[in-house]
Image (cartoon, coloured by chain):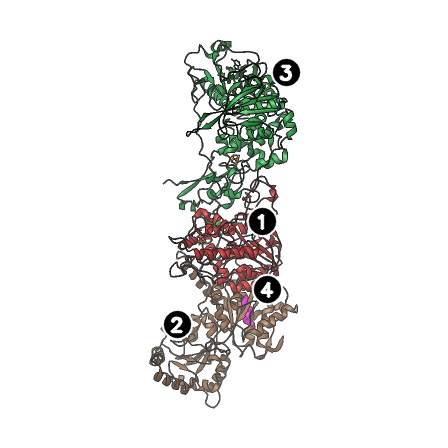
């Protein structure tokens, strides 16, 4: 059924259709509307068989989800930014214990300085936590990915973060196609846990594992994630069969058949990028051989898929909303791993941190320059150099540490400027 | 009274069992069919009070619920000595997640059981004093405040024992730990710090709060039984001497707990909805020295020149407990 | 369940980890000797029979008791209960009233007509027992139990020895005595009354394989006291013996008893009951030095007996009016011996009864070779055998400690030794267990419970009748008293070890079967030993 609604609401309704049994809620923007909506549904009786728990922290939220999941309940929570960091110990624990919790991360920058706006630093800080990470491009996809995520998580016995851009998606009113309960029930079987706390069949979950078996435990987690690389496309295909739309999968290409330059990105910015690409290919100044690779599944990282998508291009530009301070891009580093030995030129464009707008104008400019290999290996989109340089100058004058910071920045540029 | 005192049966209810009592009045631990929720082969130190306290408490919970208990366990000695791969000592469904989140994990389990309609199955959360009074305090308070259907049991051995005997907020004044060494002008743990969590639990007005020791088994069992009769958040704080951390002989574990109670150092009481209902009276009042002396963690008080002022201070603390909780008057309030 | 590798484990699997290898000390269950048992001259297993009494199984308790002593109703009245003096409970509140429970059990047995368990099959061996005092009765009983035929030759007209002809009725009612002797004869002990043995070796020719002598000590010791006609001088044994005759002895209005032992007290108390206005005990030394038991002195004083300490009798009935005696005050010297002071006094007296102790009449042994007699007492070895093979002896004639209980103990030991001797073996006393001292116990566990007092007869009746002075316990307080026992050194199945082991390394074997250690898991912490209330667990170093 087509509906016009806020992204958060759409996700909440989709989650509700998945029949979550335990929902843990703790407020943090821009995720809050999702749990608020779910809380209302539980309270007004439209979502039954569900415990909605107002916890005292995100650490507790994830911990409650861990307990609930281990006791065999389909468990859900949502968070962002500081909240995600606050629960980190439990985030790792959930995956270590193999508990199929689904969590929405409404992507938001991490402080200090505190900032409520969108970027991907929060989710990407958890890239090695053992969780699967799916990034939604649109609200429709966000909604769809949650349905797929429960199925996937429970099949693999691994937790999944569904990431959607804070405000840009969570607070955007868009038209979405909301599936029916029958459709979701047909696609998503009831949770049948791999292990469960049950007096009838007692087990001890969460043993202390020493050097004699720890590596194996970790390898098995890795192997599990690798399995997801085949399962995700398969479930996306099944999803299409039930719901009639393409959604999910590992990655998506756009206009890449003849592209010499391929832009790589995750999340809602892909929409803007596609518009820019369209404009660059068509129109007055068209004819650019440029395309887009959107990554939906960041963990596990589809190395082979990325390599295949970039097979025929000459260069790629990773445009990402995250910064690995001290080296550059995070997504870029992963992409580079995928194209090892392919002889491609690669650029990292750091953009949109802390909610900085990514305009078509700026994209046009940076893409054109990139086509001519005329950008820095790590480029900061729309950085106010005047402010930055003034500050650096000031610090150089007043602080001994000034030159160090400057040198570091310079190093980033130099070190990263290598061809792959 | 947390349990019915029996007529004069030689040892009454002081011993674990009593062949002179009718079977239904005997302790859970005296039964050859007790659950042994925590099995032999665990790696606790010789004479570990925590291993003992855990079996006492969980077996009692198992008995009270007909074997329908799920436990969540904080990181700490109890967890480490009971579940090192490839063996576990637990015979009940059990989960260890983290050091500081046990109460929340238990909330999650309770929520799952509720939503699945498995209300006959009950949840016990357990942790050491560090995991309870310090790092897990936030989650614990949250669980209390929401009145989640969880019995939280704290095994208080007065310090972070698993990591090598560091101070926790439950470490008693003047006690030596690795982080409150017996050096300087005020050796051992500082006075005027620390917290008594049962009193904080009381302030949450939860349905049930009790303290107990491994020296009073029948009292402990009665309290667990009572706790299992109630729905909502419940808290039992059990004093479990630790031979390693306290520097006591392995065979003196129960004796030390008894002395803690008999000297008034550790008040044993029971409360419902924030009101103290009964205390376990001191049977044979003793000076605190009797309790302190056998413990190496207080050895610095008993050198060539005993620190009489410090001992007097500790005695004053005990006296305050005796007065505050009425420890010389047996019975119900 | 498809369990994840390593992080999820099968329940209880730590059984694979045998923590017993950590152990340096190993717990062992021991049966330590309770001080009461150790102190009981009859070798009763007091803690053992109290154990059954505690659960209200009085018959079983009685059966356990009579394995060592066939006369609990008597013992429960006349025994001076050294067991209670040794009882560990004294250090908690006050000693267990062992004696009163024993009496209760004996009375229960008489009330219900309980009989001894059948004896062993007959061995065909016959043993002569001379004397039916407690020593003889005890020996005969134990011999009968072992299947030997025991025949008692008793010189007197009735059985019981000093139980009948010494100890007054108000302490030992004769129905009680008769009932317990009857149970013995019903059991198969044969008593031939009025059969005085004058020559042992001769008597043995009646087809006996061995003989046990328990002739007691009946010849009163005399002190030379010049006496006139106006004051009778009698001996205590004779007076008390006459009490069992047709007519009571005539002692007069004012009776003086000379001596400081229990016999002196019994005579004085008897005199009072016979109507004497005054009964005075004259004793050479101080009250502290008096051999009589404190409680007996106390009872006598309550009944109006007066006692003159540090006093000797110089002469009786020698003055002009006759009805008096002359006494001299004594004073203790540096060494604590009484010395005359030269201070004299006259006391009115119609009779003086000498209670200065007795000697044994050993004339029946005159021609027996190998016998050694020392200070009027026959010498015996650890197995109660005299210097003459096959001749055993016990009781008052063979020991310094002259009590009923000692006599019963002698009889038991002698029976065992005779049994061995009859089989051509030498009896060796079984090794004694280590003593269950108070320090080895954990008394915290015992409920607080002061001793139960036995009811005492009112003073008027005590002064005028021979009714029994001390009453017995009833069911409730006997049970209470039994349950005061701390079962020193002997497991009483309190389940403490089973409960307090942090490693579940104690196996409960079920009621009456006690416990055993599972050494696969016992880490040797020793909590069980520390928390065993009765000290029945010992930690021993682990061998390599
Ligand atoms: C007045 C009095 C009160 C006492 N009170 C107590 C008391 O309260 N508690 C206590 O423990 N002890 C008491 N005693 C001591 C106790 O009675 C004796 O220690 C005990 O009876 C000794 O037992 P026995 O078998 O050795 O000798 P006896 O009891 O003296 O028995 C010896 C028997 O052998 C018989 N006999 C002797 N010679 C011959 C022979 N040639 N042929 C055949 N038969 C013979 C005698 O007739 C007698 O029946 C008391 C003693 C007296 C005198
Ligand atoms: C977040 C976190 N911080 C610290 C630790 C290290 N740690 C593990 S157990 C423990 C001490 C546990 O003390 P307590 O809770 O009192 O239990 P005990 O071992 O004394 O029984 C500590 C500090 C940890 N595992 N996790
Ligand atoms: S350190 Fe203390 S609490 Fe930990 S296992 Fe040893 S005795 Fe038990
Ligand atoms: S307490 Fe019992 S076993 Fe111990 S000495 Fe007294 S009567 Fe004997
Ligand atoms: Mg601790």
In the rendered structure, the colour chosen for chain A is: brown
**Residue where numbered disc 4 is placed:** B146
Find the magenta span and give its range.
A144-150
Q: Which mark is residue B63?
A: 1
- Name the subunit of mark 2: A
Look at the numbered disc 2 and give the secondary structure of its residue.
helix
Chain C: give its colour: green
Distance Cα–Cα, label 2 vs label 4: 48 Å
The residue indicated by pointer 2 is A337
Q: Which chain is red?
A: B
Element marked by disc 1: helix
Q: Residues within 10 Å of mark 2 (few under 14, many from 20)?
A: some
Residue C199 x/y as whole percent: 48, 10
Q: Would you say the residues marked 2 and 4 are in contact, meaning their CB atoms lie under 8 Å apart?
A: no
Give the answer, above or below, for where A246 lies relative to C379.
Answer: below
**CA separation in Å, label 3 and label 1:** 73 Å
Mark nearer the viewer, 3 or 2: 3
Q: Nearer the viewer, residue B252 or C472?
A: C472
Cα distance in 3D space between marks 4 and 3: 93 Å
Residue extending farthest bottom? A284
User: The C terminus of chain B lies in which quarter of the figure?
Assistant: bottom right
Find residue C9 and report its horizontal and vertical position in percent.
Answer: 48, 54
- Chain that bears disc 1: B
Residue A39 in view, yes or no: yes
Q: Is residue C366 above or below residue A213?
A: above
Residue C169 visible in this rendered orientation of the protein = no
Mark 3: which secondary structure? Answer: loop
Badge 3: residue crowd in 10 Å (few <14, some 14–19, many ≥20):
few
As rendered, which of C267 and A305 lies closer to the eye? Answer: C267
| Image side of residue B248 versus residue A248, left or right | left
Whether the residues at callouts 4 and 1 have beta carbons within 8 Å, the answer is no
């Amino acid at each position: 059924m087509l509906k016009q609604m806020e992204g958060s609401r759409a996700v909440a309704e989709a989650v509700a259709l998945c029949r979550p049994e335990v929902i843990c809620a703790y407020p943090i923007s821009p995720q809050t509307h999702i749990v608020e909506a779910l809380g209302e549904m539980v309270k007004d009786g439209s979502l039954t068989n569900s415990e909605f728990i107002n916890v005292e922290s995100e650490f507790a939220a994830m911990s409650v989800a861990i307990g609930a999941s281990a006791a065999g309940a389909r468990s859900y929570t949502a968070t962002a930014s500081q909240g995600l960091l606050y629960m980190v110990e439990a985030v790792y624990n959930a995956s270590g214990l193999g508990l199929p919790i689904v969590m929405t991360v409404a992507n938001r920058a991490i402080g200090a300085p505190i900032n409520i706006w969108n970027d991907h630093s929060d989710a990407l800080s958890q890239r090695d936590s053992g969780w699967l990470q799916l990034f939604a491009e649109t609200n429709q996809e966000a909604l769809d990915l949650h349905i797929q995520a429960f199925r996937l998580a429970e099949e693999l016995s691994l937790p999944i973060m569904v990431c959607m851009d804070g405000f840009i998606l969570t607070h955007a009113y868009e038209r979405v196609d909301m599936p029916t309960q029958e459709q979701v029930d047909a696609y998503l079987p009831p949770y049948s846990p791999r292990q469960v706390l049950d007096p009838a069949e007692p087990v001890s979950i969460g043993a202390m594992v020493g050097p004699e078996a720890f590596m194996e435990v970790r390898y098995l987690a890795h192997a599990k994630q690798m399995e997801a690389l085949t399962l995700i496309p398969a479930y996306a295909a099944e999803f299409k069969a039930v719901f009639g739309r393409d959604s999910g999968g590992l990655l998506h290409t756009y206009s890449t058949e003849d592209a010499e330059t391929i832009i790589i990105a995750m999340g809602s910015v892909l929409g803007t990028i596609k518009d820019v690409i369209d404009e660059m290919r068509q129109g007055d100044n068209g004819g650019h051989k440029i395309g887009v690779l959107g990554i939906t599944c960041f963990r596990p990282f589809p190395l082979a898929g990325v390599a295949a998508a970039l097979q025929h291009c000459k260069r790629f530009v990773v445009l990402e909303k995250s910064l690995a301070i001290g080296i550059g891009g995070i997504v870029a580093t992963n992409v580079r791993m995928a194209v090892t030995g392919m002889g491609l030129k690669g650029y990292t464009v750091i953009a949109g941190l802390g909610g900085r707008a990514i305009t078509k104008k700026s994209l046009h400019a940076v893409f054109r320059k990139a086509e001519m290999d005329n950008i820095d290996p790590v480029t900061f989109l729309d950085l106010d150099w005047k402010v930055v340089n003034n500050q650096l100058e000031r610090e150089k004058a007043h602080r001994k540490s000034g030159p160090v910071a400057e040198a570091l920045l310079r190093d980033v540029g130099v070190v990263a400027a290598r061809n792959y | 009274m947390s349990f019915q005192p029996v007529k004069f049966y030689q040892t009454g209810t002081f011993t674990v069992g009593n062949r002179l009592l009718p079977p239904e009045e005997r302790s859970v631990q005296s039964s050859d069919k007790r659950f042994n929720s925590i099995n032999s082969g665990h790696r606790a130190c010789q004479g570990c009070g925590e291993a003992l306290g855990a079996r006492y408490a969980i077996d009692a919970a198992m008995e009270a619920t007909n074997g329908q208990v799920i436990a969540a366990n904080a990181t700490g000695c109890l967890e480490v000595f009971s579940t090192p791969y490839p063996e576990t000592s637990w015979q009940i469904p059990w989960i260890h997640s983290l050091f500081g989140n046990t109460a929340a994990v238990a909330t999650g389990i309770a929520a799952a059981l509720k939503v699945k309609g498995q209300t006959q199955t009950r949840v016990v959360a357990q942790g050491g004093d560090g995991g309870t009074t310090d790092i897990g305090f936030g989650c614990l308070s949250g669980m209390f405040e929401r009145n989640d259907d969880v019995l939280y049991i704290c095994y208080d051995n007065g310090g972070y024992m698993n990591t090598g005997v560091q101070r926790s907020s439950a470490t008693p004044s003047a006690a030596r730990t690795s982080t409150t060494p017996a050096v300087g002008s005020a050796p051992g743990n500082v006075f005027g710090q620390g917290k008594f969590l049962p009193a904080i639990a009381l302030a949450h007005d939860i349905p049930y709060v009790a303290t107990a020791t491994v020296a009073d088994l029948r009292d402990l069992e009665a309290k667990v039984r009572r706790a299992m009769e109630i729905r909502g958040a419940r808290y039992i704080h059990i004093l479990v001497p630790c031979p390693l951390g306290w520097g006591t002989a392995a065979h003196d574990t129960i004796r030390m707990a008894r002395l803690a109670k008999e000297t008034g150092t550790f008040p044993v009481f029971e409360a419902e909805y924030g009101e103290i209902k009964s205390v376990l009276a001191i049977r044979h009042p003793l000076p605190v020295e009797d309790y302190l002396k056998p413990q190496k963690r207080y050895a610095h008080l008993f050198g060539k020149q005993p620190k009489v002022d410090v001992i007097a201070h500790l005695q004053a603390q005990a006296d305050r407990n005796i007065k505050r909780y009425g420890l010389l008057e047996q019975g119900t309030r | 369940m498809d369990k994840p590798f390593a992080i999820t484990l099968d329940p209880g699997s730590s059984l694979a980890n045998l923590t017993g290898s950590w152990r340096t000390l190993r717990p062992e269950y021991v049966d330590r000797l309770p001080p009461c048992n150790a102190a009981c001259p009859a070798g009763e297993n007091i803690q053992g029979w109290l154990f059954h009494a505690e659960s209200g199984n009085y018959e079983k308790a009685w059966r356990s008791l009579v394995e060592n002593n066939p006369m609990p109703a008597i013992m429960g009245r006349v025994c001076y209960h050294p067991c209670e003096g040794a009882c560990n409970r004294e250090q908690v509140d006050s000693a267990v009233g062992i004696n009163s429970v024993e009496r209760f059990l004996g009375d229960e047995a008489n009330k219900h007509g309980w009989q001894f368990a059948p004896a062993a099959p007959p061995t065909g061996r016959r043993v002569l027992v001379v004397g039916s005092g407690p020593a003889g009765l005890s020996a005969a009983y134990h011999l009968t139990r072992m299947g030997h035929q025991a025949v008692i030759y008793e010189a007197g007209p009735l059985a019981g020895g000093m139980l009948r002809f010494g100890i007054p009725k108000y302490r030992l009612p004769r129905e009680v005595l008769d009932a317990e002797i009857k149970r013995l004869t019903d059991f198969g002990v044969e008593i031939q009354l009025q059969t005085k043995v004058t020559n042992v070796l001769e008597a043995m020719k009646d087809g006996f394989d061995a003989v046990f002598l328990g002739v007691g000590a009946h010849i009163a010791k005399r002190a030379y006291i010049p006496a006139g006609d106006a004051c009778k001088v009698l001996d205590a044994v004779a007076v008390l013996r006459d009490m069992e005759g047709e007519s009571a002895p005539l002692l007069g209005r004012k009776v003086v008893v000379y001596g400081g032992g229990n016999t002196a007290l019994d005579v004085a108390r008897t005199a009072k009951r016979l109507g004497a206005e005054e009964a005075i005990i004259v004793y050479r030394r101080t009250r502290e030095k008096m051999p009589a038991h404190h409680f007996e002195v106390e009872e006598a004083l309550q009944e109006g007996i007066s006692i003159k300490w540090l006093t000797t009798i110089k002469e009786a009935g020698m003055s002009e009016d006759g009805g008096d005696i002359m006494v001299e005050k004594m004073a203790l010297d540096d060494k604590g011996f009484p010395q005359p002071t030269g201070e004299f006094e006259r006391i009115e007296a119609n009779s003086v009864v000498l209670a200065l102790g007795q000697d044994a009449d050993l004339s029946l042994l005159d021609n027996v070779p190998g016998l050694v007699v020392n200070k009027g007492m026959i010498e015996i070895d650890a197995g109660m055998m005299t210097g003459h093979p096959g001749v055993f002896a016990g009781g008052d004639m063979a020991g310094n400690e002259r009590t009923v209980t000692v006599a019963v103990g002698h009889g038991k030991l002698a029976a065992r030794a005779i049994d061995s001797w009859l089989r051509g073996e030498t009896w060796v006393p079984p090794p004694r267990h280590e003593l269950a001292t108070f320090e080895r116990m954990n008394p915290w566990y015992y409920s607080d419970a002061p001793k139960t007092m036995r009811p005492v007869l009112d003073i008027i009746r005590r002064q005028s009748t021979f009714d029994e002075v001390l009453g017995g316990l009833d069911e409730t307080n006997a049970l209470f008293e039994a349950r005061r026992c701390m079962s020193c050194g002997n497991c009483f199945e309190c389940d403490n070890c089973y409960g307090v082991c942090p490693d579940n390394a104690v196996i409960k074997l079920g009621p009456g079967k006690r416990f055993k250690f599972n050494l696969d898991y016992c880490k040797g912490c020793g909590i069980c030993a520390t928390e065993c209330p009765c000290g029945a667990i010992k930690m021993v170093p682990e061998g390599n």
